[in-house]
Image (cartoon, rainbow, N blue to C red):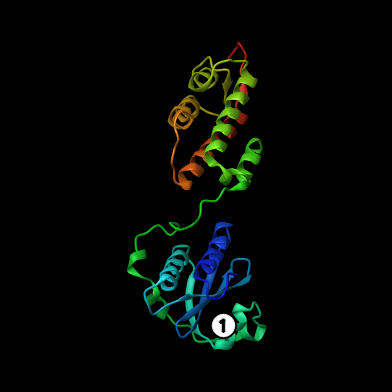
Amino acid sequence: MGRGGLTLSCQEAVFRLLQFGDNITHARILTRKGGHGLLLTTDKNETVGIKSGFASGYAGEGPRRFSYILHVLWHHGTEISQAQVSQGILDRLDASALTEADIEAIHKAKPGDHWKYYMLPQHVGVSPWSEFPPAIPYAIVDERLADLALTFWEAPGDRLLTAWRRLEDAVRKRTGLEEHGAKLFSRAFVGDAALLQWADKGAGEAEGAAQLFANGFKAHRNRRAHREVHEHPAEQLTEFLMLNQLFWLERAAQQCGPAC
């Protein structure tokens, strides 16, 4: 994975494994002079090669990103070791042509711990996920938001406004109410006379869940509807996931008749 000599590509290759949920149990740094690749082992006993886009021994992006990736792996509980390898092994790694004999030689090489010197002080105390791109966890997305999730990054602000409108429409359809926004959500979910209630929640828990709708609308949707909002992608994704939780709660609520 990654591209030999291109640090960012190799960093993103490690990101993809971790973001998808792979548990990397061991990382062997493959070193030849100032160049480094990685041989990763997952909890599924899979072996994954990361090409030699990392570097050390000078001030630059190669060593900085190498340090960052080592911090990420260390925070994930990965066992890290190092092996000095031949230029031939690195060349075959970069060509996606490692042989079984190469892998056996790597595993037989005496492991070293010099890799700790590649970890720069600037990454100590920093979030291990600070450079991860925000990613939508499709497995938990409500099906009514599926099309918005698939195209979210094309226009996040528009997708969020559409999601809020869909939530209002869903609540109006189930309750017959004609209100909008916070007033709609309050009448639908809040209080003993709420038209949508959760049978599996106690009074306090139900009240807290109900308030999420009106308060979330007031905190997020109103400002987005009335002015241009400039946000970091992580903030936009956080709001989308909060909306997704509201869709889950709405789906779980039961319609309540006059006897409630």
Q: Of 247 and 9, which appears nearest the observer?
A: 9
Look at mark 1 in the image and give the residue it sits on: 90
The quarter of the rendered structure image containing the C terminus is: top right
Identify which residue is drawn at 48% across, 71% down.
79
What's under tag 1, amino acid-wise? Leu
The quarter of the rendered structure image containing the N terminus is: bottom right
Identify which residue is drawn at 46% across, 86% down.
33
Identify which residue is drawn at 46% across, 43% down.
235
Residue 139 screen position, x and y as percent: 63, 47
Q: Quadrant of residue 130?
A: bottom left
Q: Secondary structure at mark 1?
A: helix
Residue 156 vs residue 68: left or right? right
Q: Give the residue at the far front of this rendering.
A: 228
Above or below: residue 158 compared with residue 178: below
Q: Of 224 and 108, which appears nearest the observer?
A: 224
Residue 143 screen position, x and y as percent: 66, 38
Above or below: residue 236 compared with residue 128: above
Q: Give the residue at the far left of this rendering.
A: 121
Residue 19 vs residue 223: left or right? right
Q: Of 32 and 248, which appears nearest the observer?
A: 32
Q: Quadrant of residue 173?
A: top right
